[in-house]
Amino acid sequence: MEPSSSPSSKDLQRIYRSLRLIRRAEEEVARIYPSDKIKSPVHLSIGQESVAVGVCDMLDKKDAVSGTYRGHATYLAKGGSLKGMIAEMYGKDTGCARGKGGSMHLIEANANVLGSSAVVGTTIPIAMGWALAAKKRKTGAVIAAFLGDGATEEGAFYESLNFASLHKLPILFVCENNGYAIHTPLSKRWATQHLCQRVASYDIPTFRIEDGDVFSIRNVTAWAVDAMRKGEGPVFMECLIYRWREHVGPGDDYHIGYRQKNELQPWMETDQVEKVGKMLDAETRKKIDKAVEKEIAEAIDFAEKSPVPKPRALMEYVYAD
Amino acid sequence: MPTKAKTKSAAKKGAGAKKASDGRVLRYVDALKEAVIQEMERDPDVFLFGLDVDDPKGIQGSTLGLQQRFGRERVFNTPLSEDAMTGLAIGAAMAGMRPIHVHIRMDFLMLCMNQIINMAAKAHYMYGGQVKVPMVVRSMIGKSWGQGAQHSQGLYSMFMHVPGLKVVAPSNAHDAKGCLISAIRDNNPTIFVEHRLLYPTEAYTPNEAYTVPFGKARVVAKGDDVTMVGVSNMVIECLRAHELLAEAGISTEVIDPISLVPLDIDTIVKSAKKTKKLLVVDNSWLTCGASAEIVAGVLERAGPEAGIKVQRMGFAPTTCPTAPNLEALFYPNPATIAEAAYALAKPKAKRWKPDPKKAQLAYQMQFRGPF
Ligand SMILES: Cc1ncc(C[n+]2csc(CCOP(=O)(O)OP(=O)(O)O)c2C)c(N)n1
Ligand SMILES: [Mg+2]
């Protein structure tokens, strides 16, 4: 893989803005959560933002992403509306899924954010279907399919790898390997840790990024997008990353005993939000931070003031017209 | 918490309950665990496995401590591979063991369908009786706090449809323990349906191992005007409606079928013949559902001459939404059940609704996340 050119200052600002927005938006979600205004199980990406941001920074608008129930970062990084997301968590009519899906089913068709699923692994073949359509229609678009390490244990994952490779589909599989499926570590679930080798046996180029570095993730994505647009088929990227908070809910869970807090330390030290923030001059950073806070405050206000769905909405969208 | 009527009748009719001192009040979640402990101690072929059965939360507590007690060979976690793990259970069962496969949500059983429907249900028949599949599939129905589309489905009627499977849905701790023991000892694959909101409810439960027989419904409240049949958590909602209706002068009989396959239609017919009005409240959709089966069974058995009026309630015919105000409309609740039963009892009277404050009071507890 050729090293791509270093990011421009404009790139840096954009990347930082995206990282910061996701981090702060989720922190605000966690802050609001105990008020019970959000009656939706939230799976926060805090600590994992760089994967979504690094990948999405290299995608065009016409390209798509598919995420998981831990999908706030994917949704926001690809351009999903923050207002729509917060309102969705509040169960409001203005939510991105009209209050019908909640935090686990974010979608933004305009930004090509496919809907996320609460059933692990289910969106992998669906993303592949999107890639098939892109290929058949010759749109030149590609899709990044985000999945957790746990999702790689489902048969649908391997079935998809095989088919995507066989048909040279423009799909980038992005495994966010945070080492756990709920509270169970990889060592109790995987016979070997050689995920990339497993995938490579399908003749799919694989990359492993071990430090969550947003620029490395971005570089690999740039290479993958280029290859996919040339019709060379799927690419696989495994990103080691760490979930800072509990599996579901606003708090942390180091007290329940399945993992030690010292695991978190190195990840906090290389926190990508901070790292990229420090690459900006103080003034620029402050300006971005301010704009991010404003956007979040407006989104919360929007959600608070939005109406709940009308009772008749219960029976709307059961069938398409 | 089930009403007193419920607890009392469970104590009276519980199969193994000899005298009150033999038991104590136990939570549903603990009753599930106790059943497994007693059966695993009795029979070395019983083992329990599934996603997250050994994690710090232990399937909302129902498997907590089992691995410490029985070791990793007999209680183990799995990768996220429901399809293959179901086949694993079937293979082990055919080889003579008695697996209990646990799923934290019923929705995830959709990944197990091929193995359950095409193999487990049919193997005994298709192979001319040469193999048996004595396995238990435990799964929980979720509700509230944005469980939404994919974490709240009551999909048991899909399994009821297929010969060879037994399907049970106990509504209280006593029956949870007794049915789970029955399921473990049964030589057929059993779909064991739990409900998240039942977990903290308490009922009288004998100490020793006992079985609650499949195919025997229980009358949990006596009455003369309307027969109400509830499935799983809806038994509790019907009992709440029963109390609200009592204040309006309507006396309802509440029946818990406990097992859906086999289904004890006789007990329901007997009651419906007496009241002439049958309201079936399901914990799922109506179309092709358990409620359709129960109503059809009653009408076929009783015949037109019995003159039984029937009505069904269940999930709204749509996907479960997460917005709390829509979710409230999605489920039957004590007030809507009471209103329907009243209208059934008094078709000519003005419509009646219970006082909203009293309807709210019918809930002695409320479940709040997180999950
Ligand atoms: C098919 C299926 N099985 C089980 C579950 C329960 N469950 C929810 S999240 C999860 C862990 C998934 O882990 P991973 O894919 O690594 O994603 P992460 O939560 O770490 O982001 C499990 C087992 C589910 N939602 N769907
Ligand atoms: Mg994970």
Image (cartoon, coloured by chain):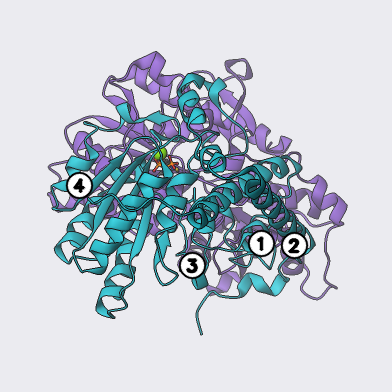
Chain colours: A cyan, B purple
Give residue A221's position: percent from left, percent from top: 33, 54
Q: Secondary structure at mark 1?
A: helix
Residue B171, given in percent of the width and then of the height, sits at 57, 41
Chain under callout 1: A
Using a 10 Å C-alpha cutoff, classify the residue at mark 2 as few (fewer than 14 neighbours), some (14 to 19) or many (20 or more): some
Are there few (<14), some (14-19), or many (20+) residues within 10 Å of tag 3?
some
Circle 1 residue: A83
Tell me the quadrant of the picture where the N terminus of chain B can be found.
Answer: top right
Q: Is residue A96 left or right of residue A15?
A: right
Residue matched to label 4: A199
Location of residue B87 with respect to B184 vertically, above or below? below
Q: Which residue is pictured at 60% across the width and 63% down the height? A: A81
Q: What is the secondary structure assignment of the residue under circle 2?
A: helix
To the question of a shared chain for discs 3 and 4, the answer is: no
Label 3 element class: helix
Query: Residue A302 got which mark?
Result: 2
Q: Amino acid at mark 3?
A: Ala
Residue underneath mark 3: B296
Task: Say which chain tag 2 marks.
Answer: A
Locate residue B48, reporting x and y percent: 35, 29
CB of mark 4 near ligand 1 (< 8 Å): no
Q: Earlier in the sequence, mark 1 or mark 2?
A: 1
**Real-space Cα separation, disc 1 to disc 2, in angstroms:** 7 Å
